[in-house]
Amino acid sequence: MFYNNDMRSLRRTLMMVLLALQLTHSAAQQFQVPDFASPTESIRLLLIASYHPAFPTWPVQREGLEERIREFEGNHQVNICLDVEFMDSKRLFSRVHFANFRNGLVEKLNNLPGYHGVLTADDNALHFVLENREELFPGIPLVFFGVNDADRAASAMKQPQISGVAERIPLEENIRFLKAAFSEPSAIYGISDGTNTGISDARLFRSMQKQFPETELRLLDLAVMSYRELKNTVKEISPSNPVILLDAYLDKQDTGMEFDQAVRFLTEDVRVPMFHVYEHGIGSGLTGGVVISHRLQAYHAMDLLIDMLGSGGDLVPPRLMSPPVRLMLDYNRWRSLGISLPAEWSNPQWVNKPLTIWDLYGIWALIAILLFAGLAILTVLLIGSRRKLILSREQIQREHRRYRTLFDEFSLGLWEEDLSAVRMFLEKLKSSHKGNFSDFLRRNPVLIQESIRDIRIIRVNDAVLKMYKARGEEELIRRLPEIFPPQAKDVFAQAMTRLFEGAGEFSSELLQRDLTGREFWVRFRLTILQGHGLDWRRALVSTEDIDEKIRNRHMLAESLREKETLLREMHHRIKNNLNTVSSLIDLQEEKIEDQRLRDVLDAARGRIYSISMMHELLYGSDTRNSVSLRDYFERIRDAVFSLHQDVINPQEFRQRAPVPELLADIELDISRMVPLGLIFNEILTNTIKHGKTPYERLTIDIKCRMNGNQAELLFQDNGGGNGGADSNSVTSQSRAGGLGLELIQVLGEQLGGDVLSQPVPGGFRVAVSFPLNAPE
């Protein structure tokens, strides 16, 4: 016995030394912040769960953890490795079991890579980690969830690098629901046990009594009762006093049960309805309850730990779950109570609710209805489309018959042709040519003329057959080259060139030949139909017989040429006759010695010469009925200076009387040009003959002003000396009884205008204003 005690002492000493070495190695591990941006980084996390894998809360907790991990890995190229260690503290709660669990965890920490963070699920796991944190998890962030002990959770969150999701079980909400559903029961029972969670839940249940003083809250505590004693007590409870099952994992005899096992044991042959604050058990014996979500707690805990790791391990504010409001009820058990739901809880989540026919086949019925409706709509659409197609086809056939009728009965000749072969010929020709292809075609029209035989006539109307004296389309198509004389082939080449350059149509007058050999003129228009601009498969040609119009045009042109010849001959003869009259005056003047008579004859000869110049200009003009006023004035000026070359130098004096360029834009007919020429003749003649200024300094200024249809000519000389009453020839002649000013006034009235003459300093000015168009 003594030997055995010594051996036990030695063994215990060796185990303590080994444990101390392991703890020293574990404490040497340091927390390293993971790199979320590194594609090769792997985040290692440890979860210590209070219970075992088959515990009802673990599957839903696992769903919440995995959901947040998937979200994180989807947004970052980082893997999260989550190790899970189950304490199994509901079933195994001896000191030996906890020591073995601790030793196994120490072995893992010593032989595996370190963890970046630790999670704990439920109260026992948090209690274990807090007791061993300094030895096992120094400097590692810790996040807890599923903790009912609010005081311990609050105390833990005061430590560095510890945060969590504190669980507040919805006990208050359950009591309110039961009071409303059971119409103010005399008592509401609560069942708890001696586990850490049970003690915390029992404390919370007792505290509710102050909040609900009108209802007695009775606690049935397994810490002082056995399972059998508890069930016997529950059997005695009236069904009108509901029971809230908080914890039932361990009784006073340290007998443990799984939660589902405890639910089956307590609800079998028991009339009183039992409710729970968590989802598990509802539908498997429990009637229902206002429940909290373990999945959501686990999701928030993982999210909180990720935030702490991302911030370098700094403390992130703790999170407290919002009070749950979700009511879950077993459909069959609740209906068996015969109780109506309170108004504020009228939309619960039902469990074990029988499936109706709609639940079983509703989705398929809906799909069938939708398919039937879709088929019906499709059938209606198909029928409508077919009807529209039939109507469209009938409309197309009517339009086609209408087109054929219009085509056949149209008064002009219409050709429907296929020019695609011509197009292909030109494309092939272009591919083998370098340079400007259009210029090449214009220089070599013979190349295009050869493609006339490639024209395919699709249809012609009756007007074409009649025009070309053909008995039918076949004869016209067969003898098509015969209707193209050489000139027509040149026009065809021009048309193909223009169309190939991108023009949509081409029109021209063309000499054709019918099948009897008669040549006649046609006006034809070639149009490429819409949609065939690239292939020329459809073209429409219209031909109109204009042979009679062309012949009439030629006759009119010939008649016009004859009249122009006669008119030119007339102007020529008038000019010659006037020159003869002027020559007779010259002969008569040589026999007269009286100077005054000689002056009169000179003036008459000058006027005759002005009229003669007009006919000479008309004789040489292309218009035959009007001449330029500038040309006319220059002729008169030169003629007057030549008549007085005995007293002036015509070449020198011409520079002193320039005619404005503006007069070149004025073209008048003979009826208006002759009066203007006579007025200009009178002014020049009188200035030269009667001006008092020496010829070496004598000048004549001619100006023209235009105002719409009104023109004004200004003539001013410097031949008057001082500008007195006798300062120029016009005044002198007037006083002497000459024709000067009187003739100018008469000619101005003939033009339909006004003449204003007045002396100016050093000379005299005459202003003639008249309309450009002859007055009616």
Image (tube, rainbow, N blue to C red):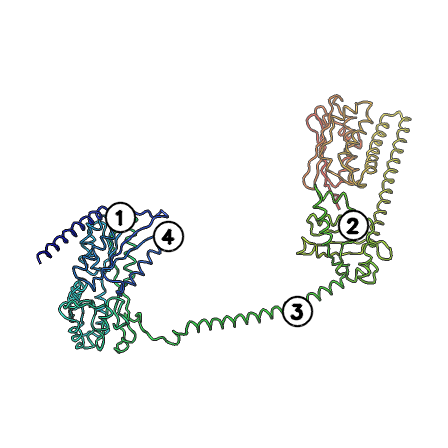
- Specify which label sits upstream in the sequence, 4 or 2: 4
Locate the N terminus and report the quarter of the image it occupies.
bottom left
- Marks 4,3: beta carbons within 8 A: no
The amino acid on which the numbered mark 4 sits, given as a three-letter code, is Asn
Q: Secondary structure at mark 1?
A: loop
Q: Nearer the viewer, residue 9 or 669?
A: 9
- Marks 2,1: beta carbons within 8 A: no
Indicate left or right for 591 with 628 as reference: right
Residue at position x 65%, y 67% in the image? 395
Indicate left or right for 392 with 288 as reference: right
Query: Distance from label 3 to label 1 (Cα)?
Result: 82 Å
The amino acid on which the numbered mark 3 sits, given as a three-letter code, is Glu
Task: Please name which of the two marks, 3 or 1, marks the residue nearer to the observer.
Answer: 1
Residue bearing the label numbered 1? 313
Query: Distance from label 3 to label 2 (Cα)?
Result: 43 Å
Indicate left or right for 40 with 609 as reference: left
The amino acid on which the numbered mark 2 sits, given as a three-letter code, is Glu
Residue bearing the label numbered 3? 394
Q: Position of residue 694 (x, y in %)?
A: 75, 21
Mark number displayed over residue 75: 4
- Specify which label sits upstream in the sequence, 3 or 1: 1
The amino acid on which the numbered mark 1 sits, given as a three-letter code, is Gly
Task: Please name which of the two marks, 4 or 3, marks the residue nearer to the observer.
Answer: 4
Task: Please name which of the two marks, 4 or 2, marks the residue nearer to the observer.
Answer: 4
- Marks 4,1: beta carbons within 8 A: no
Residue bearing the label numbered 2? 450
Mark number displayed over residue 372: none
